Image (spheres, rainbow, N blue to C red):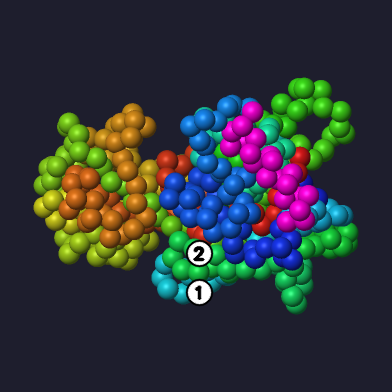
Amino acid sequence: MATVQAFTGTRYNPEHVKLGGVLAPPYDVITDAQREELYGRDLRNIVRIDYGVSYPDDTDGVDDRYTRAASFLTSWHELGILVRDDPASLYVVDHFFRHPDGTERRRRGLLATVGAAPWESSDLRPHERTLRGPKEDRLALLRATHTQTSPVFAVWSDADRIAEILDGVATGNALLGGRIDGEIASEKLLLWRVADPERVAAISGALRDTALYVADGHHRYETAAAYAAERRAAGADAPPGAAFERCLVYLAAADDPGITVLPTHRLVRPGPGIALRLDDLWARLDDAYETVPAADGRAALAAAAAMHAGQHAFAVVAQDGAAVLRRPRHSGGSPRDRLDVAVLETEVLGPAGVSPEMITAGALTYTRDPDGLDAAIRAGDAVLAFGVLPVTASDVIAVADAGETMPQKSTYFYPKVPTGLALFEV
């Protein structure tokens, strides 16, 4: 049973800022160059709080990027740049964007909170493992600011009545709106607030019996759960269900037409024992796979997509050409085992000389650009480049329901949910 609840949101005041200038991508996809650009775009951009710059003369806990984030929050509240919405609310978000296929699409989301608890008792179901470093960084920020700045992105499955309710909210003038620079093209955000208790209860009730699945933000959720446990262990004097025991989430329907998962292609670094040519790779696979020649990596990916229904099919590029690598899909196996990315890792990368330990140690790099397959080979940055097809939201749900985790870099939900639409003070 999902406990989706309203929260006392903190948001930007449109009387003082233009929303498009103060939003930022989630911290984990921001490059140093992007951060510098966001710093210069607007002095009040959320990146100064969510992913601030460290300086050589910083003093931990006294003057560092976490203490500066807390200072910015305090100052922006005092100046009216940020305002709190009372009573507790939900927020409906329409996100308009250009799909890689060139079409214009809209994804409808809901900003809310769920309980922040260990996975075994969580409202959310995960599909990947997390790394220690990002969680330590997020926890340090949360301790300093007592504010969740970026929501966990999750999808729901089989929630009756909610689409109609949200349609009734997302009408008329939006509370906030603006355009941001997207990964492909300009994107538009519109946000409506839901404060009416009956409507809030109707939305929460419509999601009560559904399952929720993490699309993006496993580190953020685990940070919220760790912070909740830390506060309780410290003897926090608060009733059950206090704000610090909740996690900010952005929820969307798994079958929303705007739900888009992009593939992340694998580039194999040069190294000892790794196949250097297509002929070498074919020999190592011992006739388990059929090959179909292709003009280049993009053409091989297009051909693989046409075979996807009945074949595990991958584009592969090396110095001696490009091809599609394929074999028939077989019944049986777990949801994870049936994923193309899992089959590639166990049946192809292994024989190619890339063990799981080598993958963990950084033997692979990644790109989402189909043309990046050929470019990496030409530049000598990779000796083999494998193009994969995207997983679906249904794949994520099946793996999560089975209690399994996907291989690293299996999903890239696009577009990312911007940071700064609403903050949650805990």
Q: Nearer the viewer, residue 33 or 161?
A: 33
**Image position of 17 (left or right of 411):** right
Vertical arrangement, residue 18 with respect to residue 212, above or below: below
What range is drawn magenta here? 62-81
Q: Is residue 227 left or right of residue 306?
A: right
State the residue at coordinates (74%, 44%): 74
Q: Quadrant of the N terminus?
A: top right
Give the numbered dot on residue 181: 2
Type of amino acid at the residue the image marks with label 1: Glu
Disc 2 residue type? Answer: Asp
Prevailing secondary structure of the magenta residues: helix
- Is 187 above or below relative to 86? below
Q: Position of residue 300 (x, y in %)?
A: 24, 61
Residue at image mark 1: 104
Q: Residue at x 30, y 54 (%)?
A: 387
Whichever of callouts 2 and 1 sits on the residue coming sooner in the sequence is 1
Question: Going 82% across and 38% down the picture, which residue do you hit?
Answer: 241
